[in-house]
Image (spheres, rainbow, N blue to C red):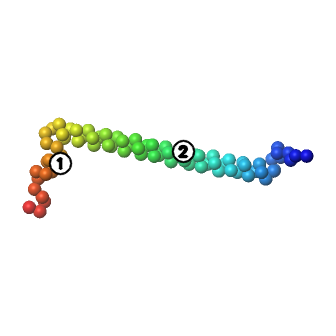
Amino acid sequence: MGKDISDPQDPWIIELETRLAFQDDLIDQLNSIVSQQQKQLDRLEASLNLIAEKLKGADSGGASVATQLDDEPPPHY
């Protein structure tokens, strides 16, 4: 008759368990990488928001940053 698949020594079962273990490890590694990238994105977003606020403050204070730089003579004069 058919082969009994409940034998724990069956190479087919061992292969499946090995693949599952590798997949679990890979999922853990990918989860860690995604978590690190999310933290980096959060930091970059905070930095970008800070820069945007500084630029808004410079614009509301009179001349823009670009205009201030244009008014200064080049360093070689």
Q: Which residue is mark 2?
A: 31
Q: Position of residue 74 (x, y in %)?
A: 12, 58
Q: At x 49% / y 43%, what residue is drawn?
A: 35
Identify which residue, 63 or 46, lies in the foreground.
63
Residue furthest to the top: 60
Direction left: furthest residue: 77
Amino acid type shown at disc 2: Asn
Q: For this view, does 40 lie left or right of residue 25?
A: left
| Mark 2 element type | helix
Q: Percent from the top left, x then y, of residue 37?
A: 45, 46
Question: Dividing the image into 4 quarters, which one contains the C terminus?
Answer: bottom left
Amino acid at the residue labelled 1: Ala
State the SS at label 1.
Answer: helix
Q: Is residue 77 above or below residue 68?
A: below
Residue 53 sits above or below residue 11 on the image: above
The residue at which mark 1 appears reads as: 66
